[in-house]
């Protein structure tokens, strides 16, 4: 007889396949194809592993990797909210919490509680791990937009002030990466691919 835990875990694994269908606004590097949430999460996990030495503080790297791999799973139910959306607030919503409880709740109780806690920690953005994970989450689309001549900034009329404000939280996770990112933002203005108000 198949163990109950295994059946729950397989059901969860099948459910999260849906993340591959959630399209983001940003496009792949040097491409006109939109990235999906699964690609985004994988890329952040690799970035966290490669860039961990630049974190402001010592990290539990496995926890960071867990955060970036699961942070957007809630979008299976809640959908992707564009970070520069002017209609819907890009913050932890009751809708996302309900999604976290439903989706992670498919797992055996102990695993479900752990992943919900990791997701909530990422959303709160207060621990060293969450700050660094959020730095990765803000860096990847910045790299994509600079590779695509402004990408979604131009497509949706996003200004320098908005980009700088949203990206500046990166310094909480890594002053080094923020310094690099701020340079990219300023270079983008000079190149005319990011407009000042």
Image (tube, helix red, strand yellow):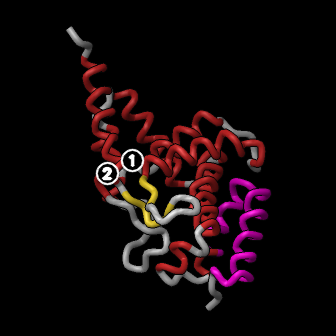
Residues shaded magenta = 164-193
Main secondary structure found in the magenta portion? helix
Q: Residue at 43%, 79% (x, y): give it.
A: 86
Tell me the tag on residue 117: none
Q: Is residue 139 magenta-colored?
A: no
Residue 7 falls in image quadrant:
top left
The residue that mark 2 highlights is 76
Q: Is residue 185 magenta?
A: yes
Q: Position of residue 117 (x, y in %)?
A: 46, 41
Compared to residue 93, the image places residue 104 above or below, namely above
Residue 168 falls in image quadrant: bottom right
Give coordinates of residue 187: x percent, y percent. Answer: 75, 75
Q: Is residue 6 left or right of residue 46?
A: left
Identify the disc placed on residue 73: 1
Residue drawn at x 63%, y 62% is 143
Check whether the beta carbons of the residues at disc 2 and disc 1 lie within 8 A of each other: yes
In the image, residue 148 lies at what x, y percent? Answer: 58, 69
């Amino acid at each position: 007889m198949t163990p109950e835990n295994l059946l729950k875990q397989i059901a969860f694994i099948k459910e999260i396949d849906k993340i591959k269908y959630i399209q983001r606004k940003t496009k792949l590097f040097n491409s006109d194809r939109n990235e999906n949430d699964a690609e985004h999460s994988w890329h952040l996990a690799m970035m966290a592993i490669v860039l961990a030495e630049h974190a402001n503080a010592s990290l539990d790297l496995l926890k960071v990797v867990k955060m970036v791999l699961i942070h957007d799973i809630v979008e299976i139910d809640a959908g992707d909210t564009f970070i520069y959306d002017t209609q819907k607030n890009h913050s932890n919503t009751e809708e996302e919490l309900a999604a976290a409880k439903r989706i992670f709740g498919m797992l055996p109780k102990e695993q479900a509680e752990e992943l919900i806690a990791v997701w909530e920690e990422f959303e709160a953005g207060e621990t060293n791990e969450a700050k660094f994970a959020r730095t990765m989450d803000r860096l990847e689309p910045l790299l994509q937009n600079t590779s695509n001549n402004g990408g979604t900034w131009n497509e949706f009329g996003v200004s320098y002030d908005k980009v700088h404000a949203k990206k500046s939280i990166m310094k909480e996770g890594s002053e080094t990466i923020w310094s690099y990112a701020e340079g990219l933002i300023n270079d983008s203005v000079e190149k005319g691919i990011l407009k000042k108000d």
